[in-house]
Image (cartoon, rainbow, N blue to C red):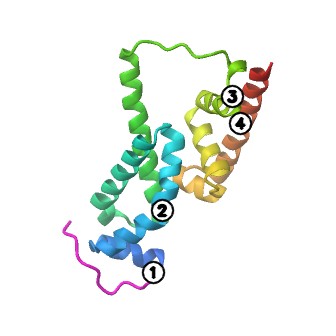
């Protein structure tokens, strides 16, 4: 899609206006979309991937995919929800690539859980959660998204999102309690 220079774009466009202008290839609209969401997206990607460089790569990849696919965005969800869904898919792809590489790398020894500082213990406990529990926990507790937003991004009912968060908190409590012993 060819990019256009900014046309008549309001200073504070609605999401629908922003989506329309992105579909038309308005560079300013893409910049606004990036400015509105990049910081939170990088934070979420960092928490999923554990590396700032990988997080920045995932956000960049997500915005490239948004640019390529925005003409097909039909507005059945919010533009933000659609963009975050693309980011999650990019993060999952990065994790799968990392997993394939780890299968060929030598194993590393980790210190016993009781010997880890709290931050490392929490990171290790988060890594022990399944993907859905971890992502719901991070989006709700760390990024501050609402259950309705998370449910829309993950394409699940809101009740399911709440259930996964409950499961995540229960698992974290169990893991951290066992770690402290």
| Mark 3 residue crowding within 10 angstroms, few (<14) / some (14–19) / many (20+) | few
> Is 53 rendered above or below residue 65?
above
Q: Which residue is mark 2?
A: 37
Q: Which mark is residue 117?
A: 3
**Residue 5 magenta:** yes
Closer to the observer: label 3 or label 4?
3
Q: Is residue 54 left or right of residue 168?
A: left
Q: Tell me what residue is drawn at x 65 percent, y 53 percent.
A: 158
| Cα distance between the residues tagged 2 and 3 | 32 Å
**Position in image of residue 102 (x %, y %):** 40, 21
| Cα distance between the residues tagged 2 and 4 | 28 Å
Q: CB of mark 3 within 8 Å of CB of mark 1?
A: no
Q: Is residue 30 left or right of residue 77?
A: left
Q: Tell me what residue is drawn at x 57 percent, y 42 percent.
A: 135
| Mark 2 residue crowding within 10 angstroms, few (<14) / some (14–19) / many (20+) | some
> Is 23 rendered above or below residue 136?
below
Q: Which residue is mark 4?
A: 167
| Cα distance between the residues tagged 1 and 2 | 14 Å
Nearer to us in this view, 131 or 36: 36
Earlier in the chain: of badge 3 and badge 1, it is 1
> Is 62 rendered above or below residue 25?
above
Q: Which residue is mark 1?
A: 13
Q: Is residue 76 visible from the viewing direction of this image?
A: no
Main SS, magenta residues: loop
Earlier in the chain: of badge 4 and badge 1, it is 1
Closer to the observer: label 2 or label 3?
3
Magenta extent: 1-13
């Amino acid at each position: 899609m060819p990019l256009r220079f900014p046309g008549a774009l309001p200073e504070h466009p609605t999401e629908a206006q922003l989506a329309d202008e992105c579909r038309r290839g308005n560079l300013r609209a893409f910049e606004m979309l990036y400015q509105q969401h990049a910081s939170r997206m990088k934070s979420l990607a960092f928490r999923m991937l554990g590396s700032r460089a990988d997080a920045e790569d995932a956000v960049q990849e997500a915005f490239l995919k948004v640019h390529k696919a925005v003409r097909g965005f039909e507005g059945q969800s919010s533009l933000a929800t659609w963009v975050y869904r693309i980011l999650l898919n990019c993060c999952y792809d990065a994790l799968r690539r990392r997993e394939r590489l780890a299968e060929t790398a030598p194993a590393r020894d980790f210190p016993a859980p009781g010997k880890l500082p709290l931050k490392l213990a929490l990171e290790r406990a988060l890594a022990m959660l399944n993907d859905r529990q971890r992502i719901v926990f991070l989006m709700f507790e760390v990024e501050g998204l609402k259950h309705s937003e998370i449910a829309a991004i993950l394409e699940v009912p809101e009740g399911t999102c709440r259930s996964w968060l409950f499961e995540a908190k229960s698992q974290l409590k169990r893991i951290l309690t066992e770690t402290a012993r």
